Amino acid sequence: MNLLGCYGQLAFIVTRMLEVARAGEWDQLPALDAQCTAAARQLQVLGSPELSAWEWALVRSLGSRIRVERDALNALLRPQFTALVRRVQTLEEAR
């Protein structure tokens, strides 16, 4: 897969993760996270190939979209994670 394809795939996965989190379908996130990790690894393998100015503009646009959606996803996950940590602490204190 080429660089643009990888960025497109990563953007699609992050968008899907955000949709899943907004719907509260938390059980789907681990598989999507694994796909996200695989796409990110593929990007590392590809490095920085020769691209036209138009292609680099598209890469920057996709990267910006990924960052915005990643931040929105983190905002949804953070309260869930905090609640989980509190539950674990409560269970440990009850022992």
Image (spheres, rainbow, N blue to C red):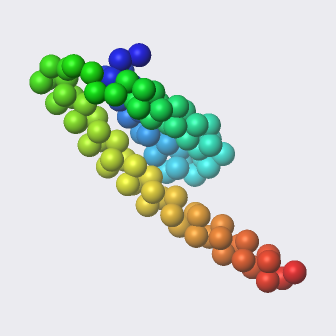
Determine whether, in the image, residue 95 is placed left or right of residue 4.
right
Q: Residue at horizontal 42%, vertical 26%?
A: 45
Picture coordinates of residue 92, whole percent (x, y): 80, 77
Determine whether, in the image, residue 56 is placed left or right of residue 80.
left
Picture coordinates of residue 15, whole percent (x, y): 42, 39
Q: Quadrant of the C terminus?
A: bottom right
The answer to whether 37 is drawn above or below residue 4 in the figure is below
Instruction: Give the camera-side residue of 12 and 1.
Output: 1
Determine whether, in the image, residue 86 is placed left or right of residue 33.
right
Determine whether, in the image, residue 86 is placed left or right of residue 23.
right
Q: Quadrant of the N terminus?
A: top left
Q: How many marks?
A: 0
Picture coordinates of residue 23, whole percent (x, y): 53, 48
Residue 8 in sight in this render: no
Q: Residue at horizontal 52%, vertical 58%?
A: 77
Residue 47 in sight in this render: yes
Instruction: Give the camera-side residue of 66 and 22.
Output: 66
Q: Quadrant of residue 33?
A: top right
Which residue is situated farthest in the top direction here? 1
Which residue is situated farthest in the right direction here? 95
The answer to whether 26 is drawn above or below residue 47 in the figure is below
Q: Residue at horizontal 58%, vertical 63%?
A: 80
Instruction: Give the camera-side residue of 35 and 44.
Output: 44
Instruction: Give the camera-side residue of 68 and 23.
Output: 68
Q: Residue at horizontal 73%, vertical 71%?
A: 88
Which residue is situated farthest in the bottom direction here? 93
